[in-house]
Amino acid sequence: MHDLLAEGSVDLGDVDTRASAPAMPEHELRLLEAARTGDARALREIHDTYAQQVRAHLHRLLGADPDVDDLVQIVFVRAFSAIGRFRGGSSLGTWLYRITANTTHNLLRQRYRRHRLQAALHWFNQGRGAHLGGAGVDARQQAEALLQRLHPDLREVFVLYYYEGLTLHEIAEIYDKPLSTIGDRLSRARKRLQAMLHGD
């Protein structure tokens, strides 16, 4: 969960500067100016005013998620660390919506990658006749050693698919190759690894 604090490609200080963007209300502007100086009361007021909005938005995005309370705090940690770069071109609520959406996106991406990695380790363990509960350092080391024996073209696709959680379409775009080529490489990687797992 702490990795979320370091993730995110969105510039948290960037705002919508189009002419049609609504100006920040005067009371919010004063609050923002105080918060930029590190005023504890201003930061607390922002938190208390918008925490429920952030929590509700997270519920809409994630449903009944056990990490919602932690995510609310992560959103505000990210917001307060970037508040000096926020130019006030939108309301505080809109800015926090954007940070909430970005944080949620990072979390879902993290979970997807973790799921794919667990699937990869499970796949390796099945191949060597081990139980899922045996997945650990030894399984990871064996998996890494086998991956290094794959042709680079096959290894790259396998790693991007299982370890990074990318879709076949995304991998095809990265390498500018037809989807069928990427699918074939993934299939060949699986077959080659399966053969190596059985000592062929």
Image (cartoon, helix red, strand yellow):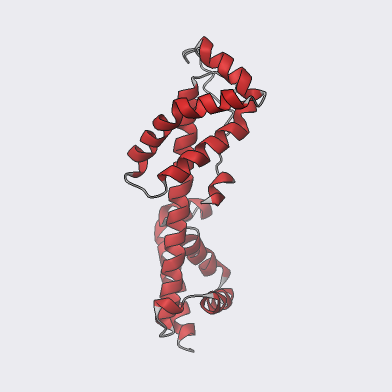
**Res 69 quadrant in image:** top left
**Res 145 quadrant in image:** bottom right
Q: Residue furthest right?
A: 37
- Observer able to see residue 113: yes
- Observer able to see residue 178: no
Asked if 84 appears above or below 148 in the picture, the reply is: above
166 and 63: which one is in front? 63
The residue under the point 47% across, 78% down is: 193
Asked if 134 appears above or below 24 in the picture, the reply is: below
**Residue 111 pos. (x, y %):** 44, 55
The residue under the point 52% across, 12% down is: 27
**Residue 200 pos. (x, y %):** 48, 89
**Residue 114 pos. (x, y %):** 46, 60
The residue under the point 49% across, 84% down is: 196
97 and 30: which one is in front? 30
**Residue 146 pos. (x, y %):** 54, 78
25 and 87: which one is in front? 25
Asked if 127 appears above or below 37 in the picture, the reply is: below
**Res 58 quadrant in image:** top left
37 and 11: which one is in front? 37
The residue under the point 47% across, 84% down is: 197
